[in-house]
Image (cartoon, grey):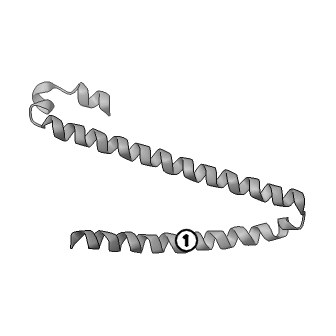
């Protein structure tokens, strides 16, 4: 991305578009990349923590293996519910910003 912007022909790109607009676009793109990496890291740490917790519970008490699928199913159902609720809240927040 940065390479293609900096090596664009001068008369076709840099003369038409102000440097501030180019920098704002690059900063926005880099912030989006950082946000994606941060979210991926958070999800990965959360999943690894859950796996370790289930393993520790299983090693302490073997009967927890029977409860694990139920707990995972409930967690998935809650996740789906809160994702849809989050979308609605995000939409309402966007409407509030317009007013």
Image quadrant containing the C terminus: bottom left
Residue visible at 16% across and 34% down in the picture? 19
Name the side, left or right, on which 12 lies relative to 36: left
Which residue is labeled 1 in the image?
Answer: 80
Instruction: Count how many numbered circles sit on residues in the image.
Output: 1
Which quarter of the figure is the N terminus placed in? Answer: top left
Toward the viewer: 9 or 34?
34
Q: Residues within 10 Å of mark 1 (few under 14, many from 20)?
A: few
Residue at left 77%, top 59%? 54
Image position of 58 with respect to 33: above or below: below
Residue 9 location (% of width, % of height): 16, 25
* Left/right of residue 85 with respect to residue 16 in the rendered view: right
Tell me where residue 59 appears, x and y as whole percent.
88, 56
Q: Position of residue 45 (x, y in %)?
A: 62, 50
Residue 57 occupies which quadrant of the picture? bottom right
**Residue at screen point 27% across, 73% down:** 96
The quadrant where residue 31 appears: top left
Relative vertical location of residue 6 with respect to residue 48 in this rendering, above or below: above
Regarding mark 1 in the picture, which secondary structure is present there? helix
> At which x and y percent is residue 71?
72, 70
Residue occupying image coordinates x 47% and y 73%:
84
């Amino acid at each position: 991305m940065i390479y293609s912007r900096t090596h664009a022909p001068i008369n076709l790109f840099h003369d038409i578009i102000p440097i501030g607009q180019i920098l704002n676009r690059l900063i926005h793109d880099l912030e989006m990349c950082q946000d994606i990496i941060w979210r991926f890291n958070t999800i990965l740490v959360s999943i690894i923590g859950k796996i370790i917790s289930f393993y520790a519970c299983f090693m302490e008490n073997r009967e927890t293996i029977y409860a694990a699928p139920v707990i995972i199913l409930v967690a998935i159902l809650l996740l789906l519910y809160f994702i849809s609720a989050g979308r609605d809240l995000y939409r309402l927040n966007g409407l509030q910003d317009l007013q």
